[in-house]
Image (spheres, grey):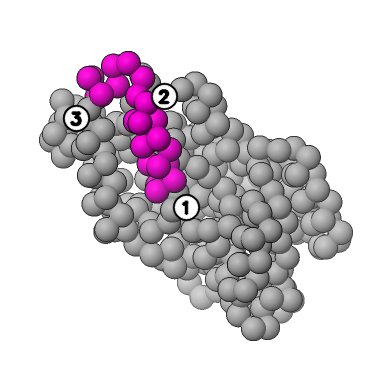
Amino acid sequence: MRPMTISTPKTIFVTGASSGIGRAAALALLGHGFRVFAAVRSEPAAEALRDAAQPGAADRLETVELDVTRADQIRVAVTRLEAAVGDGGLWGLFNNAGISVAGPLEHVPIDELRRQLEVNVIGQVAVTQALLPLLRKARGRILTTGSIAGFFSAPALAPYSMSKFAIEAFSDALRRELRPWGIDVCLLEPGAIATDIWGKGMSEFDEMLRNPPRGLIENYGGLVAALSKAAQDSAKAASSVEVVARDVVHAFSAARPKTRYRMGKDSMSRKLISRLPDRWIDALVARSLGWG
C-alpha cells in the first residue's frame, strides 16, 4: 500500500528514542517528512540524535527528557506537545521505551520484576493516557513496540515476556476502545533485532551471577549457560533496526495501517510454533536448550 502524502508536517511523539528501534524510527520518520518529538533519557543522547538527523530535517526534531515511570516528566512532555500542536492535535504516539530483565523466575528479585513491568507496561499506559486528548483531536494513531516474547515465552526470560504479553492485551483492548474515534492502534512484533536492549539485560544478569543467590547455579546453571549461548546466536542472526523503522513509517503514513507488524527472521517461525500444542512446544524448547 502506498503511503499517503504529507502536505504539512504531522507530529509524532517517540519514546525510547535514545538508541535502537526508537532512534532509528525517529530518524526514519524525519526522513519521511514528519515532525518528531523524541523522548530521550539524557542530553548527550539528545545531542547525538540531533547530529544524526539529515540536513534540513533537524528543524522538525525536538527532544524532551523523559523517563516513562515519572509522572512529572510526562506532564512536562505533554505541556510542550500541547503548545507545539495546538488545536490540530497529535498525529502519532510511538510507545517504544523498554528494558529487559532476565533470569529464572525463582531468583528474579521482586523489585526487578516491578521495574520491568513499570517501564514496559505501566509507563506505556501512563504516556498513552496523558496524550489521548491530543490524539483524539487529530484522529491520530498509536503504535507500541511488542515482541515475539509477547506470544512465545522462553525460560529465563519470563519478566520480559510477561511485560510483552501484557502489551498484546493493552494494544488489542485499546484498539477496540478507540474505534469510535477512528484512532488506529497498531503493534510491532519484532523478532531478534540488533539493538542494545538484550546486551543491557544480560549485563545486569551477569552482574547478579557475580554474587548469585543460593541455589541459582546449582539448580539452573545449565539453563543459564544455554541462555547465554542462545542470546549470542540470536545476536548474530538479528535483523537491523532499519527493518523495524520501515514498518514504523508505514504505520504512521499508510492510509490503512496494519493492526500488527511482524519483522525479523524469527518472528513468523515463532508465531507458527506458538500455535502448536503446549507439550510439543515444551519439548522443542527443551531440546533446543538442552534443558529438561
Q: Which residues are magenta?
A: 198-220
Question: In the orientation shown, which residue stands out farthest toward the front?
Answer: 210
Question: Which is nearer the N-term, disc 1 or disc 3?
Answer: 1
Where does residue 192 sit, x and y in percent of width and height? 34, 53
Badge 3 is on which residue? 222
Question: Which is nearer the N-term, disc 2 or disc 1?
Answer: 2
Name the residue nearer the viewer: 137 or 236: 236
Mark nearest the camera among 1 and 3 is: 3
**What count of labels does the image hold?**
3
Tell me the distance, in whole angstroms, between the alpha carbons under discs 3 and 2.
17 Å
In the rendered structure, the answer to whether residue 254 lies left or right of residue 63 reads: left
Name the residue nearer the viewer: 17 or 273: 17
Q: Please, is residue 210 above or below residue 49 in the view? A: above
Badge 1 is on which residue? 188
Badge 2 is on which residue? 108
Q: Please, is residue 96 above or below residue 212 in the view? A: below
